[in-house]
Amino acid sequence: MNYNHDMTSQLIRQNVARLLSELPGGVEVVAAAKRRTPAEVLEAVQAGIQIIGENYVREAKEAHELVGKRAKWHFIGTLRKHDVRRTALEIFDMMESVDSLEIAREIDEKCAQIGKIMPILIEVNSGREPQKSGALPENTEQIIRAISGLENIKVMGLMTMGPRFGSPEDFRPYFAETRKTFERIKGLKSPDVEMRYLSMGMTDSYQIAIEEGANIIRIGTKIFGERD
Ligand SMILES: *Cc1c(COP(=O)(O)O)cnc(C)c1O
């Protein structure tokens, strides 16, 4: 262990303690771990983080080797067909970024092979940005209806990023709209759908997201510091 490593681990511990102490009850933190080392991820878990969010399968596998079942693992990155391998699905406890029937079918098929029922969230492209992944808000209900019949998947809510802005307050309408979609679909009371989680908000926007009903927030920078 060198000096830098000790500095980093102390910062992570302080950041996690501060964040957890200021959150209202019922809000879960996903530590967004992209481009962090397995040692940093472990540090966050030892400081009290219970869920790790991974954007890349390869990074997830490396961190998982060190941290293992001391945390839950959520996939939060852009989900492509080649990410959906059995060895990846074995690691993850939830896939937060499912945005099409096609990718859901792939997960369903592979989960059948490993005997797992995978909880998923549907990612909503709340900013309707053409370059971004996620289902359009107006298509979300239809996608959930189509997916809900798959036997090895359980739809448990929605996730959204929202457009990148300078000011946190600018996120509010996108979070509010996603909450509305969430409540509407929840109100349908479909037998195979359990609308329990609304994952919204990052370092700059999580306070607004919680005000707008998020019960999962995904935090990277505020836990681990600026990314290189
Ligand atoms: C990186 C990332 C986050 C966290 O971003 P910060 O601004 O560092 O808190 C949250 N969600 C997703 C999907 C991410 O890729």
Image (cartoon, rainbow, N blue to C red):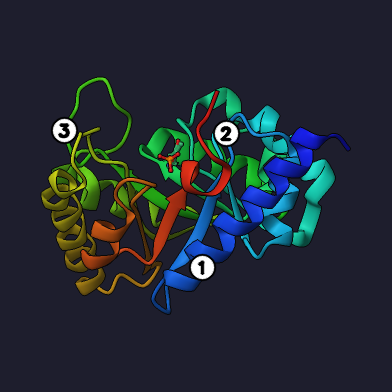
Whether residues under marks 2 and 1 lie with C-beta atoms below 8 angstroms apart, the answer is no
Crowd tier of the residue under label 1, counting other residues whose Cα lies within 10 Å: few below 14, some 14–19, many 20 or above: some
Q: Nearer the viewer, mark 3 or mark 2?
A: 2
Q: Position of residue 59 (x, y in %)?
A: 68, 31
Q: Residue at x 25, y 32 (%)?
A: 164
Q: Residue furthest bottom?
A: 25
Q: Position of residue 21 (x, y in %)?
A: 49, 72
Residue type pointed to by label 3: Arg
Mark 2 or mark 1: whose residue is earlier in sequence: 1
Ligand 1 within 8 Å of disc 1? The answer is no
- Which of the labelled discs sits on residue 128, or is there none? 3
Q: Nearer the viewer, mark 2 or mark 1?
A: 1
Q: Nearer the viewer, residue 151 or 17?
A: 17
- Which of the labelled discs sits on residue 20, or is there none? 1
Crowd tier of the residue under label 2, counting other residues whose Cα lies within 10 Å: few below 14, some 14–19, many 20 or above: some
Would you place residue 203 above or below residue 155 in this image? above
Mark 3 or mark 2: whose residue is earlier in sequence: 2
Disc 3 to disc 2, how far (Cα)?
Answer: 24 Å
Is residue 148 visible in the rendered structure shown here?
yes
The residue under label 2 is 34
Mark 1 or mark 3: whose residue is earlier in sequence: 1
Residue type pointed to by label 2: Lys
